[in-house]
Image: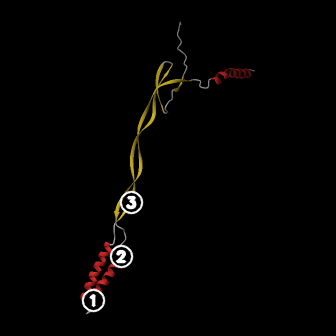
């Protein structure tokens, strides 16, 4: 029997208090007017990779061919032989071949021309910037000014938590 009375009493109290709970969905909170909001900055340093390009003069990497040297030596040998009036003097033929080979070598070496190439590389640079990390907010609630720090920029009002505490009991009062 006692148990039924406790259940009925608890249920009745819950039904009586329900409209009060439902009517104030922000119980314990109120709005306060924002007087001032000052951003709090932090310096942040971060890497930025950038592609840097430039023009550079390079010589093509091919190896000089032996063909101009051989052709020059053959032509020089023939010319040396003919200059000796066909008498077959080996000194003139060998000298002509040596001179022709040297000329062929110079032609092969000088036949290369520099080429302009664009070269690029990625360079890491560092940037710094100021970022807002918080807000120092001054607000007025019931005639008194308060300050707090928030992570987001406040609007014209800020929600404050209101805690009701019983007043100290005064004797003889």
Vertical order, 87 against 106 (above or below): below
Return the residue at label 1. Answer: 82
Write the residue at 31% across / 75% down: 107
Q: CA distance from mark 2 to mark 3?
A: 27 Å
Q: CA distance from mark 3 to mark 1?
A: 51 Å
Describe residue 38's horizontal placement relative to residue 12 as left or right. Answer: left
Q: For mark 3, does the 10 Å Cα neighbourhood hold few (<14), some (14 to 19), or many (20 or more) residues?
A: few
Name of the residue lying farthest toward the right: 1
Write the residue at 41% across / 47% down: 47
- Taking depth in this image into account, of 11 and 1 the one nearest to the observer is 11
Secondary structure, mark 3, is: strand
What scheme was used to colour the molecule?
secondary structure
**Occupied quadrant, residue 108:** bottom left
Return the residue at label 3. Answer: 118
Q: From the viewer's perspective, is the residue at label 2 or at label 3 nearer?
A: 3
Describe residue 21's horizontal placement relative to residue 34 as left or right. Answer: right
Write the residue at 70% across / 22% down: 15
Among the two numbered marks 2 and 3 on one chain, the one whose residue lies closer to the N terminus = 2
Secondary structure, mark 1, is: helix
The image shows residue 136 at horizontal and vertical percentages of 45, 29
Q: For mark 1, does the 10 Å Cα neighbourhood hold few (<14), some (14 to 19), or many (20 or more) residues?
A: some
The image shows residue 6 at horizontal and vertical percentages of 71, 21
**Occupied quadrant, residue 19:** top right
């Amino acid at each position: 029997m006692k148990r039924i009375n406790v259940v009925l009493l608890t249920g009745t109290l819950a039904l009586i208090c329900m409209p009060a709970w439902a009517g104030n969905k922000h119980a314990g909170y109120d709005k306060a007017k924002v007087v001032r909001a000052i951003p709090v900055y932090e310096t942040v340093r971060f890497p930025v990779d950038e592609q840097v390009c430039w023009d550079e003069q390079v010589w093509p990497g091919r190896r000089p061919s032996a063909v101009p040297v051989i052709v020059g030596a053959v032509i020089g040998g023939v010319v040396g032989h003919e200059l000796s009036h066909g008498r077959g003097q080996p000194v003139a033929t060998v000298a002509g071949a040596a001179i022709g080979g040297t000329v062929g070598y110079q032609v092969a070496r000088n036949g290369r021309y520099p080429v302009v190439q664009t070269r690029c590389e990625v360079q890491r640079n560092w940037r710094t910037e100021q970022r807002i990390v918080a807000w120092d907010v001054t607000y007025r609630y019931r005639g008194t000014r308060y300050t707090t720090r928030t992570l987001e920029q406040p609007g014209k009002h800020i929600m404050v938590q209101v805690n009701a505490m019983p007043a100290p009991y005064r004797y003889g009062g």
